[in-house]
Image (cartoon, rainbow, N blue to C red):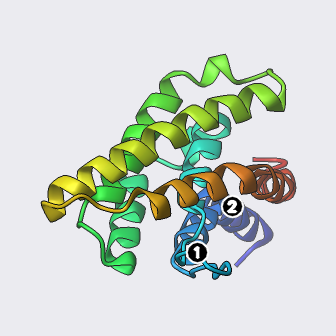
Amino acid sequence: MNSLTWRRFGIRLRLLTPGALTLAAVFVSVVPVGLSGLPEVTPFFALMAVYHWSIYRPELLPAPVVFVLGLAQDGLTGGPLGLFALILIVVYGLVSTQRRAFLGRTFPVEWFGFSLVVLGTTMAGWLISCIYFVALVDPRPVALQGALTLVTYPCVVWIFARIARTALRRV
């Protein structure tokens, strides 16, 4: 292969960065965090990834990919099939259409928007789970997951931004 072919291959590979990072987030999301005296929960890393890429590079993380990644998370967590897929695709749609409100703003504005997304997804996920299991599901683990998701968001998106700055700098 000539150098132009390798260059094109490298560019195409770098364009997969948002999808690959979101897939990694799905896998990390199923590793429980054990806190003393609390149920095992994990921050919703895939939600962080979808929110971030929906603002900054939605063209590199298309809706069908978001849906498939949500289904993968559903399968790995053993929850209601389609729950995370539905949540992620709704967040993707809402944030993608409102991305102009976030572009060029300070990080606290982005984080505030994310806090509203976390609140909505946490409540919707809990409600859908209650309906699915036809029982009142304990809201504490869901609330703890929402809080952990919100608190860890700045660190995770800082990592995403550093990787994107390197991998997508000339794409």
Describe residue 80's horizontal placement relative to residue 46 as left or right.
left
Q: Badge 1: how crowded within 10 Å, few (<14), some, or many (20+)?
A: few
Q: At which x and y percent is residue 28?
A: 60, 76
Q: Taking 88 as reference, is 83 above or below it?
A: below
Residue at image x 39%, y 61%? Answer: 70
Residue at image x 51%, y 39%? Answer: 119
Q: Is residue 91 visible?
A: yes
Mark 2, residue position: 8
* Mark 1 or mark 2: whose residue is earlier in sequence: 2
> What SS does tag 2 mark?
helix
Closer-to-camera residue (78/157): 78
Q: At which x and y percent is residue 34?
A: 63, 82
Q: Taking 74 as reference, is 78 above or below it?
A: below
Q: Quadrant of residue 36?
A: bottom right
Q: Is residue 63 visible?
A: no
> What SS does tag 1 mark?
loop
Mark 1, residue position: 38
Q: Badge 2: how crowded within 10 Å, few (<14), some, or many (20+)?
A: few
Q: Residue furthest front?
A: 37
Disc number lying in front (1 or 2): 1
Residue at image x 57%, y 82%? Answer: 31
Q: Residue furthest left?
A: 134
Residue flagged by tag 2: what amino acid is it? Arg
Q: Quadrant of residue 33?
A: bottom right
- Per the model, the C-alpha gap separating discs 1 and 2 is 49 Å
Closer-to-camera residue (23/8): 23
Task: Tell how many labels.
Answer: 2
What number is the disc on residue 29?
none
Give the position of the N terminus as an image quadrant: bottom right
